[in-house]
């Protein structure tokens, strides 16, 4: 019976053959990027050209003797050579290492790692980070190095993930590939599970909305470029989705595709989310048994006077009433866009239910403070907590706040 080659032997052989393989002209690779991760699966994305064959070999990181498994990425037929593949049969709370082989070639800089999620629906401690505002041509990218050192379980991008300011699919592809080849960012996405929604500058242009011409091309490019678990609903296009980490539920919102113009008259017909997405959100909140339910939006609730939920008072009020009327506990609001970070408390007198905490994290790679937010969830204690920190590119924590579930009832 023929035995599989041990993992360490695969890397040894790759190291010996690397100089020869590198001498051949090959496609310019972007990635890999670790996307949606559950307790037993992981999505991996990688760009390697339209005719390239990509094989991912992976094993548990803690056991060097573990035999590597291999899976071939099927070409993403509608995209210009991108591939994604699901690694299945993984173990919860376990670190894995993986190595992509492109047309038989391996390079050490392609090697990635990730940790699977805890069992779904069970209490746990975990740390996440999120931010917005990524410019690939920024000279100082040190915030990504600081972010990577935070020992994160996963990372969220809340929009302005590039400043393409277009709906042209090819130009969106070009902007995202440039960003993913920035060394400091590339290290993060190949070692920290990363999920994303968009905002105006990676959807269309500044303060853009659902009237943007070519938005279908933006949607196609986003679905090709991000290994999220899903995109919208059948019959309701968009990039919104939800996911669970341990026993915390995250609702990733699309605040652009169905959005009415900011200056449209206020009323029932003026919408931020569109009717289909709004119903999906409220239904999800009502069904959720999670202690914390996190709404993730590229737009803030009120901090931008021209381009935020403030311009949609009817729909914002409708959302607040749904939370109140259905007795939905544990809601937090994460947003971005401002190029600065703020921990905002919206008092009960304004929301109608309890003091709603909004954490705005923006500007990790744009002109300005270049910071990001981390959140430590602990749902193992009697009164579960979410501890928020705003981290500067120096590593200094400039703001922090502990939010207790008992305050969100």
Image (cartoon, grey):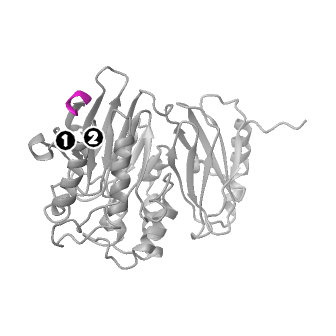
Residue 323 against residue 206 in the figure, above or below = above
Secondary element at image label 2: strand
Q: Which residues are magenta?
A: 405-409
How far from the left and from the top, in percent, is residue 16? 72, 47
How far from the left and from the top, in percent, is residue 171? 44, 74
Q: Residue furthest top?
A: 382
User: How many tags in the picture?
Assistant: 2
Residue depicted at 61% across the width and 36% down the height? 90
How many residues crowd around disc 2 within 10 Å: few (fewer than 14), some, or many (20 or more)? many
| Residue 236 visible in the displayed image | yes
Residue that numbered label 1 is attached to: 356
Q: Main secondary structure of the magenta part?
A: helix
How many residues crowd around disc 1 within 10 Å: few (fewer than 14), some, or many (20 or more)? many
In the picture, residue 406 is in which quadrant?
Answer: top left
Residue 282 against residue 3 in the figure, above or below = below
Residue 211 against residue 155 in the figure, above or below = below
Decide which of tag 1 and tag 2 comes sooner along the chain.
Answer: 2
Please state which of residues 351 and 28 is positioned toward the viewer in this rendering.
351
Q: Is residue 325 magenta?
A: no
Please state which of residues 22 and 145 is positioned toward the viewer in this rendering.
145
Pointer 1 and pointer 2: residues touching (CB < 8 Å)? yes
In the picture, residue 380 is in which quadrant?
Answer: top left
Residue that numbered label 2 is attached to: 331
Residue depicted at 68% across the width and 68% down the height? 51
Secondary element at image label 1: strand
Q: Residue furthest front?
A: 325
Disc assigned to residue 326: none
How far from the left and from the top, in percent, is residue 163? 33, 67
Quarter of the picture containing the C terminus is top left
How far from the left and from the top, in percent, is residue 142? 33, 48
What's the CA distance linking mark 1 and mark 2? Answer: 7 Å
């Amino acid at each position: 019976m023929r035995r599989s080659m041990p993992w360490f032997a695969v890397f040894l052989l790759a190291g010996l053959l690397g100089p020869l393989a590198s001498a051949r002209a090959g496609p310019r690779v972007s990635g890999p990027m670790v996307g949606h991760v559950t307790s037993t699966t992981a999505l991996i994305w990688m760009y390697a050209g339209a005719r390239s064959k990509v094989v991912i070999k992976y094993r548990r990181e803690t056991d060097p003797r573990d035999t590597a498994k291999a899976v071939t990425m099927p070409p993403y037929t509608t995209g210009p050579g991108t591939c994604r593949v699901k690694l299945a049969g993984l173990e919860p709370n376990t670190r894995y290492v993986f190595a992509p082989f492109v047309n038989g070639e391996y390079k050490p800089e392609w090697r990635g790692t990730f940790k699977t999620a805890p069992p779904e629906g069970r209490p746990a401690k975990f740390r996440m980070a999120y931010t917005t505002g990524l410019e690939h041509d920024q000279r100082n990218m040190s915030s990504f190095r600081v972010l990577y050192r935070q020992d994160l379980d996963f990372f969220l991008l809340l929009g302005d993930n590039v400043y393409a300011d277009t709906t042209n699919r090819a130009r969106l592809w070009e902007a995202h590939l440039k960003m993913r080849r920035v060394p400091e960012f590339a290290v993060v996405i190949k070692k920290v599970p990363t999920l994303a929604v968009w905002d105006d500058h990676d959807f269309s242009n500044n303060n853009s909305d659902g009237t943007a011409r070519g938005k279908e091309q933006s949607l196609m490019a986003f679905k090709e470029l991000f290994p999220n678990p899903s995109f919208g609903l059948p019959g309701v296009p968009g990039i919104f989705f939800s996911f669970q980490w341990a026993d915390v539920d995250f609702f990733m919102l699309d605040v652009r595709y169905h959005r009415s113009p900011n200056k449209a008259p206020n009323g029932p017909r003026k919408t931020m989310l569109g009717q289909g997405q709004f119903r999906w959100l409220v239904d999800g909140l009502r069904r959720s048994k999670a202690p914390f339910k996190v709404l993730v939006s590229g737009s803030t609730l009120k901090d931008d006077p021209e381009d935020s939920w403030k311009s949609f008072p009817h729909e914002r009020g409708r959302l607040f009433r749904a939370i109140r009327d259905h007795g939905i506990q544990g809601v937090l609001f994460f947003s971005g866009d401002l190029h600065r970070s703020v921990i905002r408390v919206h008092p009960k007198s304004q929301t109608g239910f309890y003091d709603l905490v909004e954490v705005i994290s923006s500007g990790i790679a744009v002109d300005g403070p270049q910071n990001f937010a981390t959140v430590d969830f602990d749902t193992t204690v009697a009164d579960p907590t979410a501890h928020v920190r705003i981290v500067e590119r120096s590593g200094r924590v400039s703001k922090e706040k502990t939010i207790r579930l008992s305050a969100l009832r």
